[in-house]
Amino acid sequence: MRIGFVVQRYGLEISGGAELHCRWIAEHMKKYFHVEVLTTRAFDYITWKNHYPKGEEIVNGIPVKRFSVTKTRDPVKFGRIQNFILENEHSEEEELKWLEEEGPFSPSLLQYINDHKDDYDYFIFFSYRYYHSYWGINAIPHKSILVPTAEYDPVIHLKIFKDLFRKPRAIIYNSVEERKMINSLSNNEHILGDVVGVGTEIPSDFSGRKFYQNHQIEGDFVIYIGRIDENKGCHELFDFFLRFKKETGSDIKLILLGSSVLKIPSHPDISYLGFLSNEEKSSALDGALLLTMPSFYESLSMVTVEAWAAGKPVLANGRCQVLKGQCLRSNAGLFYENYDEFKETLKLLLSSTELRKTMGKNGREYFRRNYTWEIIENKYLSILELLEKGK
Amino acid sequence: MIDEERRKESIKEEEIRIDYENIDVADIMEQIKRKIAKKPKKPLEEIQKGELRFTPSGHFPLEPEEVPGVKNKIRRVLLKVMKPFSPVIKLLILPVYEEFREAYLILDRTNRRIDFLSATLEQELAKLSTRVGDVSDDLGKTMEYTKLLHNLTHNIVVELSKLKIEEENLKLMTRIMKKDFEFLRRKERSLEKNIFR
């Protein structure tokens, strides 16, 4: 069987989101099928400017075909169009215009899919909200599988997406909440689907103690891993954390890992260590008391799954339905919806070693039941098998 | 040692009861919410300071736009005239602005909550209506079945009545035949007597 993975960006340098999700799934599926990746030359997700060379290259043993983005995104223009369609009554044409601005606008990628549709058995599209997914699925619905990676953000209510979710042969969801949301928005229960998510890779060589030594950290710390951004709830996290310290007199520290697009408060107990390797990230998780995940919008949160795999409890933003649902199902994390809840939950987690230990154990068990690569691979294989039977 | 540690922890967290053998996050969160609800309420400004201002709007940030035309000119002239008084105006407007902003943020958050709840409600209503439809189908079938059963019972009663009458008739006929036999037997005996005499 020949499978094409279609994604907006692809590369070893891209360290999160749907792109990493796609890379990991493609790398695991290559054991079973002939896998190819069809993507753009973009690296920057704001402008989609061409960065990688055109043509084919091999990334971790997988052929990657890159197509040019012919129109880069102008953030100001895009913002204006998005605000208009979110605030006003509008037509389907205006939604499609928004989609064109959203990008990545790469007609050659779509042309390739259209011309070579018979060469592939299935195309797996990642991220519902981009140009390539919408037009790709519309061109070859009978060979499409969609991994929506949808969050509860306003654009999901656009009419074009309501129809899109009814078109592919199968949908692979990241969480129960994502499936529920998409089902309720588009009444697409009849489409074959399963909640799968993504596994995680834990490096063999990591140590919390080494992390303490390498970065000269003293005392206990909680960790945040990911993009440091307002939409990820980081602004709120800083405020809550500093208030917590002021009110409780706790000596806990906050360590931040990842790229930053937000000003980080200058405080002796908040340390930003930038972007670290996988080994160092795992060491940091190992050394932390818990992971905090303040994001408002998540369709899965791979970092949360990694924390559970490492046996660490999680303190999540309860306004994100996915994180809340994951905490409730795993019994491996607490969540907050306001400062008072943040204070109480963090206080409780910091004060009880037993609670952290048991929650960590629950997290590891939840990971073992749902997110090991064996389970993820089998779920993908079952979906493809069902599709083959239904041919 | 572990018991000692647990005992200390239970003293520290006397308000939150945790079953460490079987942790239930929903229950812990319920207890935390109850504990918070018991605390005296904070003034609204503090709540606003604390969390509402961070709720993301989902909007893309825009640069301020220049408004062309006569309106813009008038606006510029007015701004120039009012410039010396701007600190006083700002001071006067600030509480109203803060209140407006506070109300806007609360409304925004409420709207998002309403959106989510109404989506869930719609989904639940759709499920409920499907269920009602199924139940009403089942009810219709049950009613038809009951009617059939009623007719069947009625027919059985009629048939049983007929059978009873038949049985009575047969009994009567049997009695008559018995008498006839008796008569014939007596006749046979008298005839025999007469023959053999």
Image (cartoon, rainbow, N blue to C red):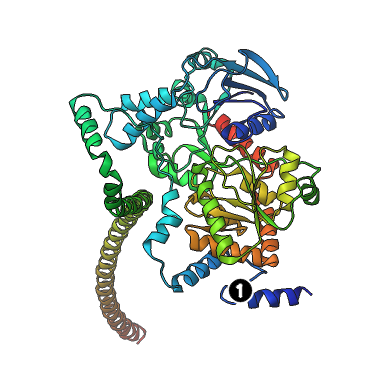
**Which residue corresponds to the image point at 53% horizontal and 20% vertical from the top-left?**
A49
Question: Mark 1 belongs to which amino acid?
Answer: Glu
Give the number of callouts: 1
Is residue A238 toward the left or the right of residue B193 in the image? Answer: right
Q: Considering the image in quadrants, where does the N terminus of chain B appear?
A: bottom right
Q: Secondary structure at mark 1?
A: loop
Q: Nearer the viewer, residue A370 or B187?
A: A370
Q: Is residue A243 above or below residue A72?
A: below
Left or right side of B92 for A154: right
Q: Residue furthest front?
A: B84
Residue in the foreground of this view, choosing between B102 and A196: B102
Does residue A357 lie above or below A107 as drawn?
below
Residue A202 shows up from this direction: no
Query: Dot 1: within a 10 Å radius of its alpha carbon, few (fewer than 14), some, or many (20 or more) residues?
Result: some
Q: A262 or B106: nearer the eye?
A: A262
Q: Which residue is mark 1?
A: B13
Q: Quadrant of the C terminus of chain B?
A: bottom left
The chain containing the residue under callout 1 comes to: B
Q: Position of residue B10 (x, y in %)?
A: 65, 76
Place of residue A223 in the rendered image (x, y in percent of width and height, measured from the top left) = 65, 50
Residue A200 drawn at (x, y percent): 68, 41
Is residue A140 shown left or right of residue B80?
Answer: right
In depth, the one of A213 and A85 nearer the eye is A213
Relative placement, left or right, of A46 versus A162 is right
Q: Quadrant of residue A348?
A: bottom right
Q: Say if residue A53 shows up in the picture.
A: yes
How far across and how far down the image is residue A51, in percent? 59, 18
Q: Quadrant of residue B151?
A: bottom left
Q: Residue at x 65, y 67 (%)?
A: A351
